[in-house]
Amino acid sequence: MDCHKCKSQGQSCKKRSPKLLFSPKNQQPFTQDVSHNPQIALVGMPNVGKSVLFNALTGIYVTVSNYPGTTVEVSRGLAQIGEQSITVIDTPGMYSLLPISEEEKVARDLLLLEPVAAVVHVVDAKNLGRMLPLTFQLIEAGLPILLAVNMMDEAHRWGLDLRPDLLEMELEVPVVCMAAALNQGIDELRHRIASLLPVQVAMIPA
């Protein structure tokens, strides 16, 4: 592709216009090789604060690219969990593992086809009843689930309360209550994620 100036003048300078590989909105590319990092995926319905949590975990160094063969954008970023670097994938919003849209199909394929050490299911504490069916589907699919009950500050304003210990006992998966927009519960979430990551074995020199 010729540069914009030459193209507008009907000429050809053989220069290439730069191709944007990363989202320009307050995001910067990371250059670290992430091929050997454990991956975790953030999943959930739209408007549950999933992207806020993604930004809280990864900061601004992320890549945004289309999932292969689709026009659906997927964000990936680096997060530090203890002394270990992990790749965090912000999947498109989904309501079910039985997809009815291209976004849901991409989210399902990411979960079932890519190796993930943990799947963080982000739910809205105010609407837990309609969020949990997806949790059950994820559990039944044999995925390593961590339930992140977000927007607890809003739930408290509504007079709602939650016993994460009882919910954890019933679901038999880790449960973290949080308010990602207020940076509440992020440290506990990191701690619980760490328990799901594969143990790195130090190489002993011969």
Image (cartoon, rainbow, N blue to C red):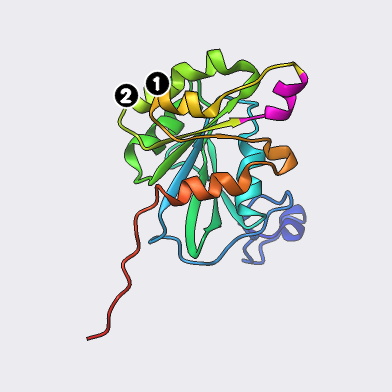
Kindly identify the residue that appears in the image at 55 percent across and 56 percent down: 79
The type of residue carrying mark 2 is: Glu
Rate crowding at label 1 as few (under 14), some (14 to 19) or many (20 or more) other CA atoms within 10 Å. Answer: few
The type of residue carrying mark 1 is: Phe
Q: Quick check: is 156 in the magenta stretch? A: yes
Residue 35, image x, y percentages: 40, 60
- Residue 160 as seen in the image, left or right of residue 85: right
Q: Is residue 87 above or below residue 206?
A: above
Question: Element type at marker 1?
Answer: helix
Disc marking residue 136: 1
For residue 206, which quarter of the picture?
bottom left
User: Foreground: 105 or 166?
Assistant: 166
Kindly identify the residue that appears in the image at 34 percent across and 46 percent down: 115
Kindly identify the residue that appears in the image at 77 percent across and 59 percent down: 5
Kindly identify the residue that appears in the image at 53 percent across and 35 percent down: 72
The residue wearing badge 2 is: 140
Residue 80, image x, y percentages: 54, 59
Rate crowding at label 2 as few (under 14), some (14 to 19) or many (20 or more) other CA atoms within 10 Å. Answer: few
Decide if residue 78 is in sight here: yes
- Residue 61 as seen in the image, left or right of residue 103: right
Where does the magenta region start and end?
150-157
